[in-house]
Image: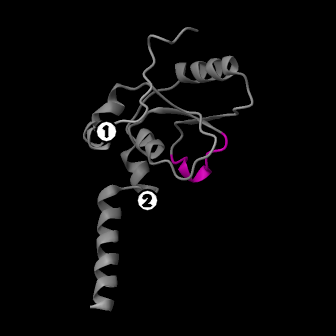
Amino acid sequence: MCLHSALQIAGKKNTKLVTLACGNTYLFIYIFLFPSLYEGLPVTLIEAQSSGLFCAISDVISNQCVITENVFRFSLSDSSKDIANDVYNRYKKFVRKEMYEIIVKKGFDIQNNSKQLEVFYLNEYKKYK
């Protein structure tokens, strides 16, 4: 399977540009491949799932990040050929769908979370005023 011409490695980008483009970028992606060795809570994985993407992630990433059924885990000890074949075969059966309600139920709604954070900080500020 030759993917050289079809892959785009994001690498380091201007953060402001990525933030502005992020919402639309996920619409043009088919598979979110995340072969991380060490990871805390990858927000990009949450964003990818909320966009309804098929996500293939290494098995070292925390279960806390798996909030939809769109996630397939693989072991980095497997060969890259086996990983690619597994991801491809699972993706062929995948149907992209709306994930907003699931994301909200799991507590990852930005409007609700930002409001809670605002209330928290305002209450803390009042304590020390």
Q: Is residue 63 left or right of residue 120?
A: right
Q: Residue at x 36, y 56 (%)?
A: 109
Give how far across and how far down residue 56 sits, in percent: 56, 32
Give how far across and how far down residue 89 sits, in percent: 60, 19
Q: Residue at x 45, y 46 (%)?
A: 46
What SS does tag 1 mark? loop
Give how far across and how far down residue 44 sits, in percent: 44, 43
What SS does tag 2 mark? loop
Number of other residues with Cα within 10 Å of mark 1, as a class: few under 14, some 14 to 19, many 20 or more = few
Task: Please name whichever residue, 13 or 60, is drawn nearer the observer in this view of the structure.
Answer: 13
Number of other residues with Cα within 10 Å of mark 2, as a class: few under 14, some 14 to 19, many 20 or more = few
**As displayed, is residue 129 above or below residue 40?**
below
> Which stretch did the figure color magenta?
59-67
Q: What secondary structure do most residues of the magenta stretch adopt?
A: loop
- Read off the residue under disc 1: 14
Tag 2: amino acid:
Gly
**As displayed, is residue 123 above or below residue 28?**
below
Q: Residue at x 45, y 25 (%)?
A: 9
Q: How is the rendered protein coloured?
A: one colour
* Quadrant of image for the N terminus: top right
Tag 1: amino acid:
Asn
Q: Residue at x 31, y 39 (%)?
A: 14
* Quadrant of image for the C terminus: bottom left
Q: Are marks 2 and 1 in contact (CB under 8 Å)?
A: no
Give how far across and how far down residue 108 sits, in percent: 41, 55
Whether residue 36 is in magenta: the answer is no
- Read off the residue under disc 2: 107
